[in-house]
Image (cartoon, helix red, strand yellow):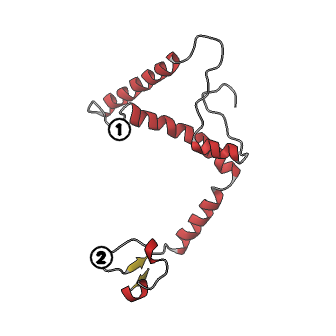
């Protein structure tokens, strides 16, 4: 940990970018070396095409979870007890599936794809292949 006094902080040329504190002094913490090395390794791995392709799949799942949490109130349970809560989740999932199926047209054409997420747009712009959703018949 490093502490900077008022007299050290005030003349700093980038002081305007710092957050304001009551005594105008700053304390900066540094993680242990092992944690810092782990963070650097993980951040470097996140820049690889393989990691981004795996994350593209996860982003679709996260979108579905977000739909349940915000669109269908799944953060709050109507009932007490794990079995009743589980039943509520199952019935809500069935209702969402029926809702999605009813939005399909009766023609033999495939339904229009969902608009891509910002992350999927990023993958497309950089030529990184993204896996198809689990909803499609082929990968």
Task: State how many labels appear.
Answer: 2
Residue at 49%, 34% in the rendered image: 64
Residue 133 in the image, given as x and y percentages of width and height = 62, 33
The residue at the point 50 percent across, 74 percent down is 32
The residue at the point 69 percent across, 49 percent down is 50
Q: With respect to residue 18, does 121 lie above or below?
A: above
| Callout 1: SS | loop
Query: Which residue bears the numbered disc 1?
Result: 75
The residue carrying pointer 1 sits among few (fewer than 14), some (14 to 19) or many (20 or more) residues within 10 Å by Cα, namely few
Kindly identify the residue that appears in the image at 51 percent across and 40 percent down: 62
Compared to residue 110, the image places residue 127 above or below, namely below
Q: Outermost residue toward the left?
A: 80
Position in image of residue 5 (x %, y %): 38, 86
Q: Please tell me which of labels 2 and 1 falls first in the chain.
A: 2
- Image-based side of 103 in relation to 52, left or right: left
User: Is 6 positioned to the left or the right of 103 in the image?
Assistant: left
Q: Secondary structure at mark 2?
A: loop
Q: Which numbered circle lies on residue 22?
A: 2
- Label 2 CA crowd tier, 10 Å (few <14, some 14–19, many 20+): few
Q: On the rendered image, what quadrant is the N terminus found in? A: bottom left
Furthest-top residue in view?
Answer: 106
Task: Name the image quarter holding residue 73.
Answer: top left
What is the residue that sits farthest to the bottom in this orientation? Answer: 7
């Amino acid at each position: 940990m490093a502490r900077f006094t008022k007299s050290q902080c005030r003349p700093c040329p980038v002081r305007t970018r710092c957050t304001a504190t009551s005594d105008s002094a700053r304390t900066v913490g540094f993680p242990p070396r092992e944690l810092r090395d782990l963070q650097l390794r993980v951040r470097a791995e996140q820049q690889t095409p393989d990691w981004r392709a795996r994350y593209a799949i996860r982003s679709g799942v996260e979108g579905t979870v977000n739909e349940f949490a915000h669109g269908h109130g799944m953060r709050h349970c109507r009932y007490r007890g794990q079995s009743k809560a589980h039943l509520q989740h199952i019935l809500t999932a069935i209702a969402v599936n029926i809702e999605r199926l009813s939005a399909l047209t009766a023609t033999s054409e495939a339904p229009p794809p969902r608009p891509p997420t910002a992350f999927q747009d990023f993958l497309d712009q950089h030529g990184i292949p993204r896996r198809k959703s689990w909803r499609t018949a082929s990968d």
